[in-house]
Image (cartoon, rainbow, N blue to C red):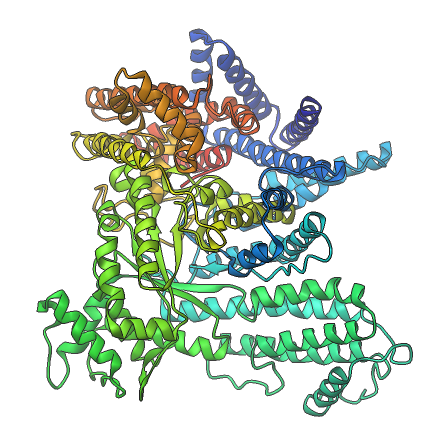
């Protein structure tokens, strides 16, 4: 069956390729098509058998391309990758549907498989319910600039996906199939004539709208389906009378418009705009859904009797809201339609209010609007209860139930917006405010203990500190953020915000500084004998050093009575954010992974000691070098006993489009994440199996050796950073206009500290090094193993028995597979100091070879990704098409950087260069 299935996939890929060829022939001409085909066939043959003469011929062909033809060739390969991505996504979806139809056990990570495991292990319904009641699965969308595709292109690709799915209908006749194929070719032709590269750098508003795209396109449909699928799996496994109830465990967050760390374009008014745009999006969806329901719930009062509570509520609504105008008898005998008409009228008032406030923050609001999501949900529940009262349970559990799930998941806020700022901004604001009081305080000169005492005292005062008449602009802006948060909580929803994330948290005072600044806006403080707190703070620990200091910082914070009072007032939940990207850039993948693992154990142990709930917020990127990897496996690889039902993690860039562009894939991805969380949360009902102590000792030694190797290369090797900037397109990535956030903390600083983690990973991926995801692993394994076969046996045991170690090496395999040291070596042509560059490259290549050898030996595999043949095949299919793009990119980089050429000549090569970056990112299915 697998062979037949892959045959279907290859047939679909071939169809896409043929249609793209026709478009190229008709729209770009035979010269472009011939160049594309020559490069395609040539590099496919070179992958099978190297031939120096043929390689030289292909290089000459690339060098002979003029700028316009180069653009067309690059775009052809890029579009091919996008179409292959569609074919693979659709194929995987069809395979899952086939499994469902057969009626047997489903795929690993499905609700069916996980619940069957629980049932077979004797987990009772009450225990399942206990875990479910603790679940909070919270993906957080961010605008980090790693998505190279424009929203317009994503919309076009979605249409192509939907059209291609129609070809799977076995009932199609020859003429119908031909018409669909023509429609598909037309969509490919539109894509060919749609510019995939942004002509202007996106504004934050554009990035917010990019995030909203996924809700419209897939998530509004996917979310209720996830809940339904879990309910069905519970009925199948535990029976229809198990009493297990599925709560609304999905929550979505966003940083887009709230993350101001390093992005000067995010202002207080930007944050207000983001929250209002979120509300407008969800209100539009509710209007659509309530309108649809009014065409479904058409029961006549002459044929059924609604509940007394429903009729009383309807009568109250008729008096208070003039929804019908002159048509007061509309739907007089159809009570549910009448109720839904009033509900729609009220939602329209909410929609009018938010649109008016987007134009004028002081605009008057309608008194007929819902005051909050609570009243809207209450109305929906009232309809449901009434339907149940007259025997319409099957109706109540259909479309209406889906709307209730959506309302409980999204409220009137859609996503919880996190706000993020770097700790020094708060310290400077506090120092500025205190220096200008009647009795000035030199805050910067105080010790940590003195700062904590002062801040706790200031927060606990009933009378707020007066604001000085003259304060720095930066201080004013920082205070304005808290004022906007207070305002949006009242205007939109108390749930409009998630947490306030503090980057570079080095001390407990950094958290109390934020609480103090928030108290000035009325978000936290003390009245009489009671604390109140409408702000949750998430300290972010990013570097290796920060992670090593997490325990003393958090212990100091949780030991402060004032902070404990505030924490209790806000729900006794402490969120802690862990930064994967910067810790990996700082000390390498092994040190990062191990320090993050230990940090999680320390934090959850500490919060348990203080009897405080803990939620870990994982700052993961899309690539392994930034904490990425399959979500299900990543959650199961967390330390045993640290996941207590809740998990929060960032989703960004190409990860968003890969997971959420299509509702079918969104259902699968959300399910895989939730089941990972469900399994990892068994510690809620039974003590977890602790890690073997010797595993920790091994990882400690591996981590130290890996970090030494990584730092020796990146910090201790002369010319290393020059190598990075010269043999990768990292400098040109900044010209791509894919994000509003600058790629460097300081424009003039090319140090490792200055460059952000995303372009750091993006640059290494483009030049096919993928170095951040694996460098140091080979040396560490080699050093620890020596020539001791018993030690190899121990590592193999760890790989098979310890999810953390398995995930670490499995993810490294994917990055090793995506690397290509041969192509990486071709980029040395760009180096200004060839001998130094060659030495660095040979060192990197040596580590690659060593890592490859040792990882395969530990995993007992003959080839990379041998345990995941589907992924292996997918990546293998792409390599021959990536090869010409990398060689085109090298040629374009040479010309664009050639200072002997005129500015005009150099600029001519920028277009194909930028498009090559886009195309390689699409082909590798990741950027940063």
- Position of 719 with respect to 574 (left or right) is left
Q: How many marks?
A: 0
Q: Tell me which corner region of the image, top left, top right, bottom left or bottom right, holds residue 107.
A: top right
In the rendered image, the quadrant that contains the C terminus is: top left
Residue at figure coordinates x 19%, y 77% from the top left: 433
- Please determine whether, in this image, residue 148 is positioned above or below residue 65: below
Q: Position of residue 601 (x, y in %)?
A: 33, 49
Foreground pick, 447 / 269: 447
Question: Residue 924: image x %, image y %?
Answer: 48, 33
Q: Is residue 37 left or right of residue 577?
A: right
| x and y, in percent, of residue 117 in the image | 60, 42
Q: Residue 336 occupies which quadrant of the picture?
A: bottom right
Percent across and percent down for residue 155 are 61, 49
Judging depth in this view, the residue of 765 and 660 nearest the camera is: 660
**What residue is drawn where x is 27% and y is 35%?**
697
Residue 768 visible? yes
Quarter residue 167 falls in: top right
Rendered residue at 58%/49% (across/down):
123
Compared with 577, 153 (above or below) is above
Q: Nearer the viewer, residue 555 or 159?
A: 555
Figure quadrant of the N terminus: top right
Instruction: State the residue lying farthest toward the right.
Output: 302
Q: Is residue 312 above or below residue 677?
A: below
Q: Is residue 899 visible?
A: no
Residue 489 placement, left or right of 220? left
């Amino acid at each position: 069956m697998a062979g037949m299935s892959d045959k279907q996939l290859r047939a679909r890929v071939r169809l896409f390729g043929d249609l793209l060829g026709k478009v190229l022939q008709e729209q770009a001409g035979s010269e472009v098509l011939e160049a594309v085909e020559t490069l395609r066939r040539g590099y496919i043959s070179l992958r099978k058998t190297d031939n120096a003469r043929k390689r030289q011929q292909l290089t000459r062909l690339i060098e002979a391309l003029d700028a316009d033809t180069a653009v067309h060739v690059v775009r052809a390969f890029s579009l091919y990758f996008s179409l292959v991505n569609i074919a693979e996504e659709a194929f995987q979806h069809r395979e899952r549907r086939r499994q469902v139809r057969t009626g047997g056990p489903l795929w690993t990570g499905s609700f069916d498989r996980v619940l069957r495991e629980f049932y077979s292990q004797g987990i009772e319904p009450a225990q399942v319910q206990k875990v479910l009641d603790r679940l909070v699965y919270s993906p957080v969308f961010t605008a980090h600039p790693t998505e190279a595709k424009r929203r317009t292109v994503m919309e076009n690709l979605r249409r192509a996906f939907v059209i291609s799915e129609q070809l799977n209908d076995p009932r199609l006749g020859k003429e119908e199939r031909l018409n669909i194929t023509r429609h598909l070719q037309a969509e490919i032709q539109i894509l060919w004539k749609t510019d995939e590269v942004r002509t202007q750098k996106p504004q934050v508003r554009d990035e917010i709208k990019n995030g909203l795209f996924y809700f419209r396109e897939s998530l509004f449909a996917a979310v209720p389906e996830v809940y339904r699928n879990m309910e069905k799996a519970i009925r199948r496994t535990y029976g229809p009378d198990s009493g297990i109830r599925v709560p609304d465990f999905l929550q979505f967050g966003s940083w887009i418009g709230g993350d101001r760390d390093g992005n000067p374009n995010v202002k207080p008014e930007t944050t207000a705009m983001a929250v209002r745009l979120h509300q407008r999006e969800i209100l539009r969806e509710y209007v659509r859904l309530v309108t649809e329901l009014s065409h479904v719930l058409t029961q006549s009062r002459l044929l059924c009797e609604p509940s007394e509570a429903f009729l009383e509520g309807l009568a109250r609504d008729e008096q208070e809201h003039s929804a019908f105008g002159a048509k007061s008898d509309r739907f007089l005998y159809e009570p549910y339609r009448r109720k839904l008409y009033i509900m729609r009228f009220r939602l329209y008032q909410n929609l009018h209010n938010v649109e008016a406030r987007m134009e004028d923050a002081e605009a008057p609001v309608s008194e007929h609007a819902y005051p909050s999501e609570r009243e809207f949900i209450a109305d929906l529940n009232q309809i449901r209860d009434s339907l149940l009262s007259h025997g319409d349970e099957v109706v109540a559990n259909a479309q209406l139930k889906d709307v209730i799930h959506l309302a409980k998941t999204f409220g009137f806020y859609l996503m919880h917006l996190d706000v993020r700022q770097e700790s020094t901004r708060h310290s400077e604001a506090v120092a500025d405010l205190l220096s200008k009081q009647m009795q000035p305080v030199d805050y910067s000169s105080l010790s940590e203990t003195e700062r904590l005492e002062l801040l706790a005292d200031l927060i606990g005062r009933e009378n707020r500190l007066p604001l000085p008449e003259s304060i720095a602009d930066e201080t004013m802006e920082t205070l304005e953020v808290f004022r906007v948060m207070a305002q949006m909580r009242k205007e939109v929803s108390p749930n409009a915000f998630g947490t306030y994330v503090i980057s570079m948290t080095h001390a407990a005072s950094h958290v109390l500084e934020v609480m103090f600044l928030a108290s000035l806006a009325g978000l936290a403080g003390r009245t009489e004998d009671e604390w109140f707190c409408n702000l949750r703070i998430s300290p972010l620990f990013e570097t290796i050093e920060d992670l090593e200091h997490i325990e003393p910082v958090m212990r100091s914070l949780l030991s402060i009575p004032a902070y404990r009072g505030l924490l209790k007032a806000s729900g006794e939940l402490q969120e802690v954010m862990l930064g994967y990207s910067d810790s990996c850039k700082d000390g390498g993948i092994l040190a990062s992974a191990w320090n993050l693992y230990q940090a999680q154990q320390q934090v959850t142990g500490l919060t348990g000691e203080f009897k405080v709930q803990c939620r870990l917020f994982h700052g993961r990127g899309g690539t392994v070098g930034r904490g990425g990897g399959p979500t299900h496996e990543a959650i199961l690889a967390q330390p045993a006993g640290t996941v207590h039902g809740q998990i929060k993690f960032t989703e960004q860039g190409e990860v968003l489009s890969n997971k959420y562009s299509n509702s079918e894939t969104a259902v699968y991805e959300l399910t895989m994440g939730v089941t990972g969380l469900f399994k990892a949360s068994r510690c809620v009902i039974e003590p977890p199996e602790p890690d073997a102590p010797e595993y920790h000792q091994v990882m400690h030694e591996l981590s130290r050796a890996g970090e030494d190797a990584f730092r020796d290369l990146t910090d201790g090797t002369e010319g290393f950073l020059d190598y990075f900037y010269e043999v990768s397109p990292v400098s040109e990535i900044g010209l791509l206009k894919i994000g509003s956030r600058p790629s460097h903390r300081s424009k003039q600083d090319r140090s490792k500290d200055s460059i952000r983690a995303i372009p750091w990973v993006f640059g290494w991926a483009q030049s096919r090094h993928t170095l951040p995801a694996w460098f140091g692993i080979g040396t560490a394994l080699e050093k620890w193993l020596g020539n001791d076969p018993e030690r190899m046996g121990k590592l193999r045991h760890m790989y098979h028995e310890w999810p953390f170690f398995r995930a670490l090496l499995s993810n490294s395999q994917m990055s090793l597979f995506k690397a290509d040291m041969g192509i990486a070596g071709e980029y040395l042509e760009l180096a200004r100091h060839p001998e130094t560059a060659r030495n660095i490259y040979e060192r990197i290549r040596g580590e690659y070879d060593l890592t490859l050898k040792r990882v395969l030996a530990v995993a007992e595999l003959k080839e990379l990704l041998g345990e995941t043949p589907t992924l292996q095949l997918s990546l293998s299919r792409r390599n021959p098409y990536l090869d010409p793009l990398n060689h085109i990119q090298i040629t374009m980089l040479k010309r664009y950087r050639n200072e002997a050429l005129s500015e005009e000549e150099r600029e001519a090569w920028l277009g194909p260069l930028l498009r090559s970056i886009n195309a390689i990112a699409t082909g590798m299915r990741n950027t940063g």
